[in-house]
Image: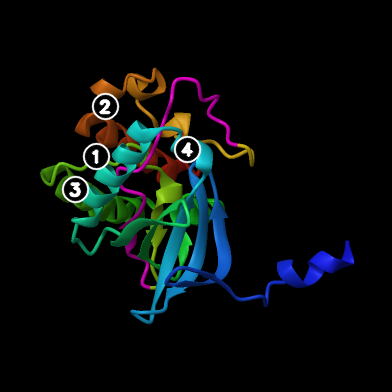
């Protein structure tokens, strides 16, 4: 009805704890991502709120915090930093660096990259992943949508170690987007064998991503 127009109007400022929400950037299998401003630090951030169903029980919640905190210790120019992990009014969230630019998947929608550019980009992404592996963090959902290209065209990997895949998942989220995109996932991951997922899973995904860069489509 007409009574709701004001509340849902884009000019309506919404605060979520220490964050002033500016606009929704993306919606996917794990939650909603907003462009926001962290008020106390006066810095732009990407704020990811976790969908309630994704952390269904205490084990999921503990794992989310353990993995987010491990990812928050990664300090590398090719990795989007995680600033804060927490909950506000029962809503779990984490905030990370805001990258002004587009994702690799948005870039590939225009067509494949020249081979030299693809190789150079992949070298930078692979170095970021190697750094993470040296620090005990596995990405587990590496794909073009999780590689952001900043204003200078440098790749910044995001959503480290935070991918969730349950055997019961159909692979589709409520909004119709694929979660843990099968095209980029190694066989041990699509089979839901979480205990077998190690650094090799990310290496497989790097190869699949390079394929997408060269051809403009997933393998």
Disc number placed over residue 138 in the picture, else none: 1
Q: CA distance from mark 3 to mark 1?
A: 7 Å
Q: Earlier in the sequence, mark 2 or mark 3?
A: 3
Q: Is residue 71 above or below residue 138?
A: below
- What secondary structure predominates along the stretch shown in magenta? loop
Which mark is nearer the camera, 4 or 2?
Answer: 4
Q: Earlier in the sequence, mark 3 or mark 4?
A: 4
Judging by the rendered image, the residue that carries numbered circle 2 is 197
Which mark is nearer the camera, 1 or 4?
Answer: 4
Mark 1 and mark 2 in contact? Answer it, CB < 8 Å: yes
- Residue at the (41%, 22%) spot, across then down: 190
Mark 3 and mark 1 in contact? Answer it, CB < 8 Å: yes
Which of 6 and 31 lies nearest the eye of the viewer?
6
Q: Position of residue 26 (x, y in %)?
A: 55, 55
- SS assignment at label 4: helix
Say few, some or many: other residues with alpha carbon within 10 Å of mark 3 (under 14 / 14 to 19 / 20 or more): many
Q: CA distance from mark 2 to mark 3?
A: 15 Å
- SS assignment at label 2: loop
Q: Which quadrant of the figure contains the C terminus? A: top left
Find residue 44 and report its image quarter: bottom left
Residue furthest to the left in view is 134
Judging by the rendered image, the residue that carries numbered circle 3 is 132
Q: Position of residue 45 (x, y in %)?
A: 41, 69
Mark 3 and mark 4 in contact? Answer it, CB < 8 Å: no
- Residue at the (52%, 45%) spot, across then down: 51
Disc number placed over residue 54 in the picture, else none: 4
Q: Earlier in the sequence, mark 3 or mark 1?
A: 3
Q: CA distance from mark 3 to mark 4?
A: 24 Å
Q: Which residues are magenta?
A: 152-173
**2 left or right, relative to 93:** right
């Amino acid at each position: 009805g007409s009574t709701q127009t004001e509340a849902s109007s884009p000019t309506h400022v919404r605060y979520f704890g220490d964050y002033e929400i500016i606009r929704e950037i993306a919606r996917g299998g794990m939650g909603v991502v907003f462009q926001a401003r962290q008020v106390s630090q006066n810095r732009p951030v990407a704020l990811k709120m976790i969908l309630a169903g994704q952390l269904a029980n205490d084990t999921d919640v503990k794992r989310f915090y353990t993995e987010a905190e491990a990812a928050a210790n990664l300090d590398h120019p090719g990795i989007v930093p995680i600033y804060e992990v927490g909950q506000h009014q029962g809503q779990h969230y984490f905030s990370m660096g805001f990258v002004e630019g587009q994702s690799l998947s948005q870039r590939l929608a225009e067509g494949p990259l020249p081979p030299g550019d693809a190789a150079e980009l992949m070298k930078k992404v692979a170095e970021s992943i190697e750094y993470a592996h040296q620090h005990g963090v596995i990405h587990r959902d590496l794909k073009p949508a999780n590689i952001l290209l900043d204003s200078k065209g440098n790749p910044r990997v995001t959503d480290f170690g935070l991918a969730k895949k349950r055997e019961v998942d159909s692979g589709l989220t409520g909004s119709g987007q694929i979660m843990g995109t099968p095209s980029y996932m190694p066989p041990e991951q699509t089979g839901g064998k979480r205990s077998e997922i190690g650094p090799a899973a990310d290496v497989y995904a790097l190869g699949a991503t390079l394929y997408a860069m060269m051809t403009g489509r997933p393998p």
